[in-house]
Amino acid sequence: MMAPESAEHAGGIEYKWQAAIVVVLGLFLSVLDNTIVSVALPNIRRAFGTSFDTVTWVATAYFLAQAAVIPVTGYVSDRVGTKFVFVSTLSLFLIGSLLCVLAPTEVSLVGARVIQGLGGGALMPTSFAIAYRAFPRDEWGRATTIIGVPVLLAPALGPVIGGLLTTVFDWRAIFAINLPIGGIGLVLAILLLHGKRHERTTEVESPAERFDVLGFVLSLAGFTTLVYGLSEAGIHGWGDTAADRSLIGGVVLLLALVAVEWTTRAPVLDIRLFANATFAGANLLLWVVIAAFYGTLFLIPFYFESVQGTSALTAGEIMIAQCVASAIGIAAGGELYNKLGPRPLVVAGLISLAISMIGFTHLTINTTGTSLQARIVLRGLGLGLTTIPLQNLALSVVRSCSSTSCDRSSAPPGLPP
C-alpha cells in the first residue's frame, strides 16, 4: 500500500490528522473490548448462573472471531477500499455491542461477541492501512506511534474501565459504552475518510488480480482452529483431546496456507515477507510480547477477584500503573527510534519485561496489589519500549521488499543503526 501526499486540508486540519482521529476512535474500542470483559467475567457468571468454562467463552469468542478475520482484511480492503471496510466493520462492531447489551442468555452473549469480534478484528488492520496511506512515507514512524497509543493503552485501560462500569452500573455497561463513542467514530468516518478513488495501491494489489479463494479459506480455517485449540488447552490442559486435535489441525491448515500463498501471484497473506530475517524476527518478538501482555491482563484481575475477593473496580485499579508506564514507554520509543534505532530500545524493553515476568511467578494468596506495582510498571515500560520500535522495524522491511521477492537476510535500507 502506498501513502499519498497528505497536504489536503478541511476545516483547517490536514487530512492525515483527520484520518488519525477517526482510526484511533475505532481502534481504541476494538482493542479495549479484548480486555474490558476480564474483570466482569465473575459478574457475568453469577448473572447467568453458569460455569467458569462457559463464561470464558465470552472472551474467547471475541478472540476467535478476530483470528478469523484479521488475516484477510488487508486483502479485501485493497479491493473495495479501506473506507468502505472501516465503516462496514465499525457498524458490525456496534451491532455486536448492542446485541451484547441485550443478550438474555450466556449463549446469545457469546454469539453477540462473535459478531463484535468480526467487526473489531477487521478494524485493526484497516486502521493501520488508513493511517499509512494518510501520512507521507517519511512520517510512517509517527503514524505507528499514534496507532500504538490505543493498541497498548486500550487493553491496559480495559480492566480499569470495566471495573468502574461493572461496579457503578452493571456488566452490560461495558458493552453499552461502545455505542456513543463508536457512533461518533462512525459519523466521522463517513464524513472525513477518503474513498477508494483517492487511494493508490501497488500493481500487485490491483483489483484485476484473481481472488485467492483457497488462501482465504485456509486462512479462516487455520487461524480459527489454532486459536480455538490454544483456548481449550488453556482451560482444560494440554492433554485435552479436543485441544490437541484442534492444535494439530490448525498447524496442518496453516502449513497448507504457507505452501499455497508462497506460489500464489496475489496472495491473501504475503508469506514471502517472512523470508526476510528482520521482518520474521520483529513479528516473532511482537507475538511473544503481546501474548505475555494479554495473558497477565486477564489473569491478574481474575486472580484478585476470584482468589482474594476484591471488587471489579479494585482489580482494575491495580492495573492503572501499567497504563501510565506504557504511555511513557510509547512516547520514549517514538522519540528515540530515529536517534538510537530499534535494537537498544527493544533490548531494554525485553529486559524490563523479563524482570517483571520473573516477579509474577512468585504470586501467593497473600500477594497485594501494592506489592505488584513495581512489576506492573516494569511491564508497562517494557511494552511501550518494544512494541512501537518492532512495528516500525517490520514496516521498514515491507517498504524495502517487493511482493515477489524479499532478501532473506538483508537489513532494510534506511534502517537506523
Image (spheres, helix red, strand yellow):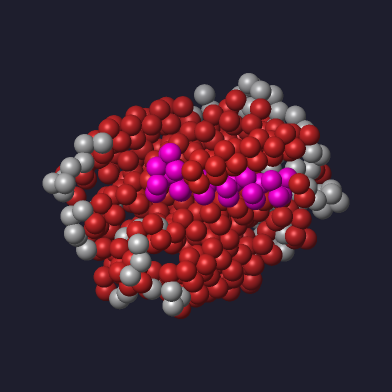
**Residue 217 at least partly seen:** yes
Residue in the picture at 16% in, 46% down: 365
Going 38% across and 57% down the picture, which residue do you hit?
53
Name above or below for residue 33 compared with residue 413.
Answer: below
- Tell me if residue 261 comes above or below residue 94 in the rendering: above
Quarter location, residue 333: top left
Q: Is residue 52 left or right of residue 276?
A: left
- Marks counted in the figure total 0
Q: Residue at 64% across / 67% down in the picture?
A: 88
In this rendering, the answer to whether 276 lies above or below 46 is above
Where is residue 109? Give x, y as percent: 46, 69
Q: Residue at x 22, y 63 (%)?
A: 311
Q: Is residue 337 magenta?
A: no
Task: Report x, y in % for residue 137.
Answer: 64, 43
Where does the image place residue 47, in percent across and percent down from the top left? Answer: 33, 72
Q: Is residue 220 magenta?
A: yes
Foreground of the two, 297 or 337: 297
Identify the residue at the far top of this view. Answer: 409
- In the rendered image, the residue lying farthest to the right is 208
Q: Is residue 210 left or right of residue 54?
A: right
The span shown in magenta is 215-240
Outermost residue on the left side: it is 366
Q: Residue furthest front?
A: 241
